[in-house]
Every structure is written in structure tokens, then in C-alpha cells.
Amino acid sequence: MRAFVKMAFVACALFLFMAAHLHASVKLPSGKGFLETREHKGQEVFSLADLVRAMGGSAGKDPVSQYPVWETNGHRVVLSTNTPMASVDGKIISLKSTPVEIGGDILLGTDFIGAVLPKIGFRLDEEISPGNGDHKNAQTRQPAPDGKVTVEKTVAYDLIRITFNGSMASLAEAKKEEGKIRVRLPRGKAEMSAENLGEGIATSISVQDGGREVVISLDKGFRSFETVSLKNPERLVLMIKGEGQKPPKEGAAPPSADRELPPIRQAYPAKKPGKTLIVLDPGHGAQDTGALGKEGTVEKELVLDLCLRIKESLEKENIDVLLTRNSDVLVPLRERAAFANFNKADLFISVHFNSSPLKSVRGSESYIMSREATDIWSKELAEKENLSPGSEESGDGLSLILWNLAQNQYIVESTSIAGELQQSLNELFGTKDRGVRQAPFAVLEGARMPAVLLEVAYISNQQEAKDIQNREFSDKVINAIVAPLARFRDRNAPPPAP
Amino acid sequence: MHRLPLLSFFALLALLAGCGGGDGTAPAAPAPSLADNSANRKQVVLLYPSEKDGILAPFASAVEISETPQQEMTGLLRAYLSTVPGGNLVNPFPERTALRAFYLEENGRAVVDLDQWAFEGGGTDTETYRIYGMINTICYNYPEIRSVKVLVDGQERETLLGHIDLLNYIPPEPSLNGKLP
């Protein structure tokens, strides 16, 4: 009998030991041990509460969005339970799976460890290896190659944009001398080979001094350049402005085709004689999700779907349409209007869905470029160049200075079409028209045609977020947008082709 | 400063003054009485979006009178970011947004440096209310300021939430304001 009890005790102990150790787990960084994981709908997940216990900090809810929040080490991680995303100190990070709220706790996919922890001060300095479980989703931090600066180029008819990424690139200096712009890197070397850019604004880009300097050779179409230093990621953006840039002639190295190219790289303007051309700009894209609304709505997805359908309807009205993006890619704000300029569009509409801190607000709104802002910027620019609007020098010189503020010539027409679009949508929604608003929108600034930023509806409003996802209702929205655009076409019909 | 103590403070002031300052149903409520009685405080108007009509409506407050305009305007902005106006008015910034620095430049220009909490959220309305609630408040209380540049974490940013150009100095937009005192 004693022997039996002993055996049973040993068996139980062995069972408990195995049960404990057969649980899957994921290794935490900074020597914090392992975190138990479990399966939820085919995903390996762990509990946020367990993570907070292991790593420190506190978990709660964001008072505004009511999304789960984890605060630790002076960082703030906000989790969406609608989309596979997290925000770390305000920056959006994509996750492989959507965090799930169950019984007051949040379950996170194991990829969260590799995606988020390095961004809040935990170094994944060793490979995340399995505890006793399967860790196929865990990620290891890939340290950025030190000292390397990658160079990206976007070439358009009136703008060449060169981005230097990495190794203190935001501190690089750009100087113009003898028909060239020289960009001196403070640290690291540019990873690129010489390239033919074509002709017009610039002809080539090359490296000198063992990669410490990047040199852009300018052409007769060059007008001005400016740089913008940006962080997260560290980069310097060099914008070279002018007109008439043409692609390299046959035989020159083709551009990289390993990713989808934004439409701005189309070689020739799409405008056809005698036809109205409208450029629709689905706002945001890629990592810039735009607003996250009720009902799990994501602005960048809604606007793309809507713009593709508006395009179809407008084409039935014999109006040509181009989109600044037709997939989930990020097109820089200023390149969107440049795309419309290059294609000589008659109208530019940047399409968005709104979100507001005001709970009661609903309906449609439209915005145009701010007259106040353009007036003051024009004046400041003129002062900077020692020009006055009345002086003899102010003709071409001032026009050139105002390159960025082209939109102020079209404010009346922009207001008119903005008002019609807003009225048409508000009639559909049964909401009060609050008038066309003005603000200095980056996406509208350079447009050389009437330009409007249209906020179709509020996805922060539960009812509107629901309505807009209903196919029948969104068809009505499309009709409400197309009707004023057809009237615009009738008012501004270009002369027929000879 | 955290909002809860400030909220209690203003609630107390409102009770003492016998007014519901900033309920958004009327033009600016009279400044709190304690502020009136205090020799070293100055009445100011903070502009917040109103649930009632979506415009920037006035909320009466007070800031310490300081030795320099820069210190005083810094106080104004700190009050703007941390106040929960209540009633129909809403502070458009996330609760913890803080002012990192405020600079005055020549020619009526100022620079506001916010911390990264200002990036949270999305939508043109949210962004418009944050930028213009703050800029219109500065320029209304200190008309000598004609334009403001907004930095986040000490860096120049293209936009806050993807729409309004922050690379340039921004003048106030009076069309967004309601009736002001």
C-alpha cells in the first residue's frame, strides 16, 4: 500500500511538472524570463497582464479612445482591438494579429515582443529562442547597419525628391554650387551607384569622397531646392524643384521595379484635349492609416475603396480620372498635387474621412487652402527675397517664389466646388452645412488648379461609420459626389480637340 | 500640471464666482472671481471646440502675470493644454500633452514645441482644432503674435496628423472662432 502511494505521488508530481513545462512560452528580453502563451483562434498569444507583471509599468485604458494602454519606462503603448496595430509613443506599428480583449485582459500575438519591445527601451540582443513551446512568430531585432545611408529617389515632371535614410542623415548639409547640389553626410556612406536621372531639372546623381558626399548635377529646368530634416526614421529629404524633367533615354539604367511605383512616375501627362481630367487623391496610405474610427474602420482603406468607385462613376460621365494611389502605398503629401500638376488636371480632390474630438459632430465638411496663410506666406517670402508685389521685379520672380503657394490663384473656384460637394453630401446625410473651411493643407499647397480636401463623413460617429460601410448607402454617397463634379465639368468644359 | 487638480480648482472658482465658466452655451463666461481679485493674475480666454456648433468657443481663465511676455504666454499655453473646460467644450489634445518649450521671435512670430502626445489620434477635425485652438488662443490674447510655428519633440514636422502644413509659420484662422468677448 505504501509503495502504491509513493508511486502515485511520484506520478502526480511528474504529471504536474510536465504539464507546467509543456505549456508554450515566449522568451522575454533583458533577462525577464519566459511568458506563458496559449492558442487563441489559431494564433499563439499571451496576456498583457502577464507581460506587464514581467516587464513592469501599468496597464489601463486611454481616456479618450478607450483603447488598452500599457505605460512603461516613460513610453506609452496604445493597442487597437479593432485592427492589427499598436501605437508606440504616437507612432503606428503594424502587428500580425489584432489584440483581443477577453475577460478584462488583452491577448497579444507573440510577434508583439519583437515589434514593440525594442521601441520602448528593451533590447532584443539575443535570439528569442523557444522555452518549451513554438516561437515561430517571435521576432529578433535586426540592428540597423551602422554607417550606411540609403538613398531613395522619386522623379516627377516638376519635382525630384531624394531621401537620405540612416546614420544621422537628418544632419546632412545640402549646398548648391556650380550647377550642382552637394549633400555632405555627417557620418556614414551613401549606399548607391551613379545614376542617370534624364534631363530637365537634373541629369544625374553620383557619390564622391568614398560615399561621404552625394552630388546631383542640375539642368536648365532647375528652379530651387529645399531640405527637410525628419526623425523616426532619421532622414533628410531633398526636394529639387523646377519643370520639364524627362526620363533617361533608352539604354540608360531602368528604375527599380521591385516595388509598386507611385503613379507620379508616369512618363507623360494624361490630359486629353477636350476632356475634363480630375485627379482624386485617396488620403493617407501604408503606415499612415489616417483616422481609426468606430466599427473597425480605417480611413486609408475607406478612401481608397471610395475613390476607385467614384472613378468608375465619373468615367461613365465621360470625365477622365487619375488616382494619386490605387493601392495601399504612401505617396508623400506634396507629390500628390505635383502629380495633378504634371497631368495638367482640371480639378484636384483629396478625399478623406473625418474624426473629431466632438462626439456629436457628423456630416460632410470640405476645406480649401487658407487665404490667411497664403497671404502671410507670400508676404514673408517676398520680404525674404527683397521683392514687393508692386515692384518691377515682382513678375516672374514672385511667381517663382510662390511656387509652393500656387493654390491661392484658384481659391474662388476651389471654394465654389467645395461648397457644392459639401452641400450635396449634407443633403444626403440630413446634416447641417457648416460652410467651407480654410486651413493650410500640405496636400493642397502646390496645386495649380482648383483643389479641395473633402471629408466625406465622420468615422468617429458610430452611425456614419456604419452607414458608409453599407454598399447601398455608399452608392448614394458616390452619386452625391459625382453630381457636382459633372456640373463642374459642364461649367469648365475644355475646348474641343481641333 | 495634471488636469484633475486643475479641474477641481476651476470648479471651485466657478462655484465661488457663481458662474459655469465655459459651458459653451454663452459667450465667454466672466473670469473667475478669485482671478479678478488676485493682483498678479491676468484674465485670458481659451478657445476650445464646442459640441454645440463645432466652432472655437471662449472659456474664461486666468494666468499669472510674469516678468516677461514669454513666461506669460508659456503659462497661457500650459493652461490651454491642461484645462478640461467641461460643458459643451472639449480640449482637443490628448490628456497628457505637454508644452516642451515656447519661444518668441521677432516680427510677431512665436514657436510652440509640444511633446509627442500631440501626435495621438487622427482626423482633419482633430488636427484643425488642436492647431487652431492653440494658435487662435495665443493670437487672441496676445494680438502682437501674428503667426506661430509648431514643433513636436523639438523637431520640425510636416504635419501633426497628416493634413495641416507645419513646415511654415501659421497665422490664426478667425473664421473658426465663434463670438468672442
Image (tube, coloured by chain):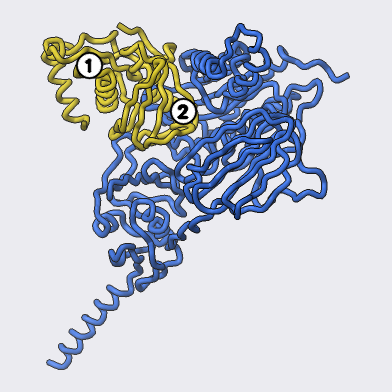
Whichever of callouts 1 and 2 sits on the residue coming sooner in the sequence is: 1
Rendered-image quadrant of the C terminus of chain A: top right
Q: Based on the displayed image, in which of its 4 quarters is residue A127 positioned?
A: bottom left
Residue extending furthest toward the front: A178
Between A390 and A38, the residue placed more toward the observer is A390
**Mark 1 is on which residue type?**
Ser
**Mark 2 is on which residue type?**
Leu
The picture places residue A103, in percent across and down from the top left corner, at 28, 51
Q: Is residue A378 visible?
A: yes
Which color has been applied to chain A in this rendered view?
blue
Q: Characterize the local packing of mark 1: few (<14), some (14-19) or many (20 or more) Cα atoms within 10 angstroms.
A: many
Q: Residue at x 67, y 36 (%)?
A: A178
Q: Is residue A36 left or right of residue A144?
A: left
Chain letter for the part of the structure drawn in yellow? B
The picture places residue B102, in percent across and down from the top left corner, at 32, 26
Q: Residue at x 73, y 34 (%)?
A: A219
Rendered-image quadrant of the N terminus of chain A: bottom left
Q: Alpha-carbon distance for marks 1 and 2?
A: 28 Å
Q: Is residue A199 left or right of residue A146?
A: right
- Tag 1 near tag 2, CB within 8 Å: no
Q: Is residue A482 left or right of residue A124?
A: right
The numbered disc on residue B166 is: 2
Tell me the subunit letter for badge 1: B
Q: What residue does disc 1 label?
A: B61
Q: Residue at x 62, y 8 (%)?
A: A391
Tag 1's secondary structure? strand
